Image (tube, grey):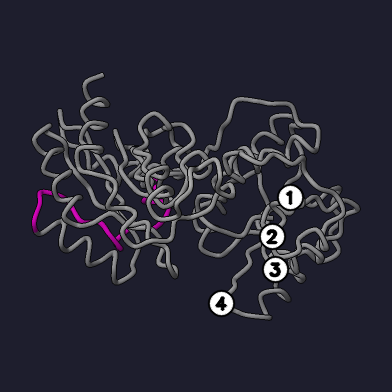
Amino acid sequence: MRLSAIGDTCHALAVIRRIQDNWPGVQVTWIIGKTEASLMQDIADIEFIIFDKSKGRLAYKDVQQQLGDSQFDIALCMHASMRANLLCRKIRAPLRLGFDRARAKDFQWLFTNRRIAAAPTEHALEAMMGFASAMGAEPKPIRWEIPLDEDLRQFASDLKSPNMPLVVISPCTSQRARNFRNWSVENYLAVISHLRKKNCRVVLTGGRSDLEREYGAALSSSAEADDLIGKTTLKQLVAILAEADLVICPDSGPAHMATTVSTPVLGLYATSNPDRTGPYASRELTVNRYPDAAARYLGKPVANLKWGQRVRHPEAMSLITVDDVTRKIDAFFDI
């Protein structure tokens, strides 16, 4: 069970693939959020049960009906929240495996009867892999394999221009209280100008929130960039990311979606620790100003912070300079 968010469900898929690689033919049922299911639910060798939180209490009844009398060997409770904890108890399994006490948020330890091994400084993907390890799964090469049909691949391929690298910029994160993970429009404009001088085609992607649409309008009207913000499905987005040569984004779902399709990610990190939530396969490309933000706004070095602690200050992302990003771009394309 992993309901959300997009990046975390990408990690969960990697865990499922490791389980499948250890025990071919294993039957896997995944309880997943409605939005996240739109990306994952056509995976043929996984049964999906969708939890639609917009239905309120009825969502729990829907899951119960879909589970029916099914019996499972083990429930992997990979989402520590009260909503997920309540769902965990609806799964008929002798073992309900949850996070270790330190990471079992919202009293998850009361809803599970076994815990993964404690590991205080793991990347979020490695933390989830602890569930596979607790089952006895041996390490295997990480894989995801999100299906993309020919229409999706053609849609994305049409964005490519001959002899022009395709760079996707997903400028915004999800809109949550005191999130503060977005870089400024002005900085993105400068980066787009730099990319165009390197003969790159720039495509903007993102969701349908008002802020994301504002970013798209500002960046596409003032720079040579194609605005697809709010105009794609999640499946179309992952197809675009698969076609891209490089993705630039802050701490957000597209960083992990791009990782699933082996596209390098230039991550912009200041308010969150990239060692915990950064693009897993692109750490050398990440701009990491988290230590600077921790020192300036929390008055502490990273070593003295709780693992994964956010720097919730509206100016923190301004510590990332345009030069920080353009140097990474230059190094990437000059390889």
- At 10% from the left and 59% from the top, the residue drawn is 221
Counting from the top left corner in percent of width and height, residue 86 is at 75, 69
Residue ID for mark 2: 105
Residue 237 lies in the magenta stretch:
yes
Counting from the top left corner in percent of width and height, residue 63 is at 71, 69
User: Which amino acid, mark 3?
Assistant: Met
The quarter of the displayed image where residue 24 is located: top right
Circle 3 SS class: helix
- At 74% from the left and 41% from the top, the residue drawn is 118
Q: Nearer the viewer, residue 247 or 103?
A: 103
> Which is more N-terminal, label 1 or label 2?
1
Choose mark 4 or mark 1, whichever is in front.
Answer: 1
Residue ID for mark 3: 82
Residue ID for mark 1: 99
> Which is more N-terminal, label 4 or label 2?
4
Q: Specify start and end residues of the magenta stretch as a single range.
A: 222-238
Q: CA distance from mark 2 to mark 1?
A: 8 Å
Residue 54 circle label:
4
